[in-house]
Image: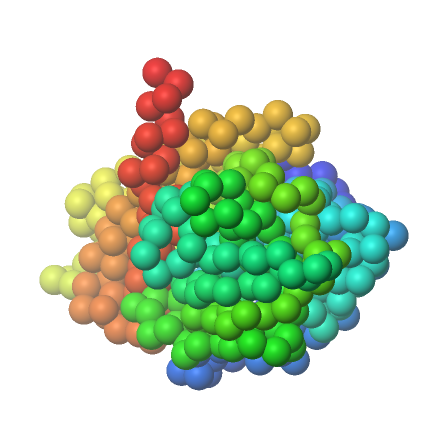
């Protein structure tokens, strides 16, 4: 038992695991071929109480904490169901509305997000800006009590299913200050682009979004004008820790599957596990995973107390994502030719893990953040 989790967290884990094994795992291959998770699964997850763990009860949420969030993140990663975009919706978009939304906005959107009727996405990335969010080109032009939103977003998780987009943009294109506005996808002038053809996370509906003079009331603004970058920065520690939590669980699950495989696979009259090289590779993996788990759980404890720093989150994301890529590559190698087959979960996990070193801030950006503290 890991000390960071309480009994209620473990009870929630049992609930989440049952749901995932029944409603998600059997359909992953189908969703990967279709490139999208059907909205019915979102509604079922909402009915089971698995969405938006930290949303307060007064807005229809479970009123849980980051421990409950971590449980759901881990259980999805355990079966390599990261492509199911619950985490972005529940742990990022909902958090923005809880943290920066006014009472009317919370009452308007959060209950639907908890139930799965409203799928929320974060619209920040643009075709030409990379990690430099201050270079964003989406414009919010004032017109009476409205904003006229013009611009384009790309690499948007859950973009195909999106109902509500927390959109970043600028009031003054000559300034670097950002503002956040919530845009309902039903508004005139809004359009969803094609589902993007990715090398991994194929079941996740990642897409482009287009804003062609979309009229949005100023009452849809999150927080104050020109304070968007500050809001984004405040949420980044949790977003990066999410990636580290996912990485640690992915390593643990794929290592268990690899151990089972090498103990059953016979080569040259003995199991693959019997070779010293195999044992040494797995011993190294277990040692590295144990150290990563200890650090990630320490970071989780800190964020539950409101004490996680930006550089600690960056270190967790950097080490976790890099280690995930390295060790899953080792696990694929230990599977031999079968590791290159999609029928084995380790192969799909290996491909899906590649993006962990890119999204949420690249490994190079993490090093830059950490270096500032030297």
Please tell me which residue lies in front, 154 or 280: 154
- The location of residue 155, given as percent across then percent down, is 41, 63
What is the quadrant of the N terminus in the image?
A: top right
Q: Residue furthest top?
A: 374
What is the quadrant of the C terminus in the image?
A: top left
- The location of residue 12, given as percent across then percent down, is 71, 53
Is residue 329 found left or right of 348 in the rendered image?
Answer: left
Q: How is the image coloured?
A: rainbow
- Residue at image location 56% in from the left, 36% down from the top: 230
Q: Report if residue 87 is visible in the image.
A: no
Q: Is residue 312 above or below residue 196?
A: above
- The location of residue 372, given as percent across then percent down, is 37, 21
Q: Is residue 191 above or below residue 353?
A: below
Q: Residue furthest left?
A: 268
- Residue at image location 37% in from the left, 73% down from the top: 196
Is residue 228 found left or right of 282 in the rendered image?
Answer: right
- The location of residue 373, given as percent across then percent down, is 39, 18
Q: Residue furthest right?
A: 58
Is residue 63 found left or right of 262 in the rendered image?
Answer: right
**Callout count:** 0
Dividing the picture into quadrants, the one containing residue 2 is top right
Dividing the picture into quadrants, the one containing residue 333 is bottom left
- Residue at image location 50% in from the left, 65% down from the top: 150
Q: Is residue 368 above or below residue 170?
A: above
Q: Report if residue 198 is visible in the image.
A: yes
């Amino acid at each position: 038992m890991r000390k960071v989790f309480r009994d209620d967290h473990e009870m929630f884990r049992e609930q989440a695991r049952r749901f995932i094994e029944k409603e998600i795992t059997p359909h992953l291959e189908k969703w990967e071929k279709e490139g999208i998770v059907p909205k019915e699964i979102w509604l079922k997850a909402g009915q089971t109480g698995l969405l938006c763990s930290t949303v307060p009860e007064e807005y229809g949420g479970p009123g849980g904490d980051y421990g409950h969030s971590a449980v759901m993140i881990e259980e999805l990663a355990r079966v390599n169901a990261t492509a199911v975009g619950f985490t972005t919706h529940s742990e990022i978009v909902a958090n923005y509305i809880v943290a920066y939304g006014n009472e009317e906005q919370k009452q308007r959107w959060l209950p639907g997000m908890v139930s799965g009727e409203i799928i929320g996405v974060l619209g920040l990335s643009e075709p030409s800006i990379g990690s430099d969010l201050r270079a964003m080109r989406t414009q919010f032009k004032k017109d009476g009590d409205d904003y006229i939103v013009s611009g384009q977003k790309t690499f948007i998780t859950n973009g195909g299913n999106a109902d509500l987009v927390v959109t970043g943009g600028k009031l003054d294109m000559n300034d670097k200050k950002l503002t956040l506005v919530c845009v309902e996808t039903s508004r005139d002038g809004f359009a969803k682009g094609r589902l993007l053809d990715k090398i991994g996370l194929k079941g996740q509906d990642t897409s482009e979004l287009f804003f062609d003079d979309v009229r949005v009331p100023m009452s849809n603004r999150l927080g104050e004008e020109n304070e968007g970058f500050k809001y984004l920065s405040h949420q980044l520690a949790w977003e990066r820790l999410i990636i580290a939590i996912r990485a640690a669980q992915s390593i643990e699950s794929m290592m268990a599957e690899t151990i089972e495989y090498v103990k059953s696979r016979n080569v040259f009259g003995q199991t693959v596990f019997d070779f010293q090289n195999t044992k040494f590779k797995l011993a190294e993996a277990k040692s590295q995973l144990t150290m990563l788990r200890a650090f990630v759980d320490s970071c989780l404890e800190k964020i539950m107390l409101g004490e996680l720093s930006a550089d600690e989150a960056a270190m967790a994301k950097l080490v976790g994502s890099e280690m995930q890529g390295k060790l899953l590559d080792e696990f694929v190698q230990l599977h031999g030719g079968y590791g290159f087959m999609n029928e084995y979960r380790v192969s799909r996990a290996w491909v899906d893990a590649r993006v962990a070193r890119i999204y949420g801030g690249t490994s190079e950006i993490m090093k830059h953040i950490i270096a500032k503290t030297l």
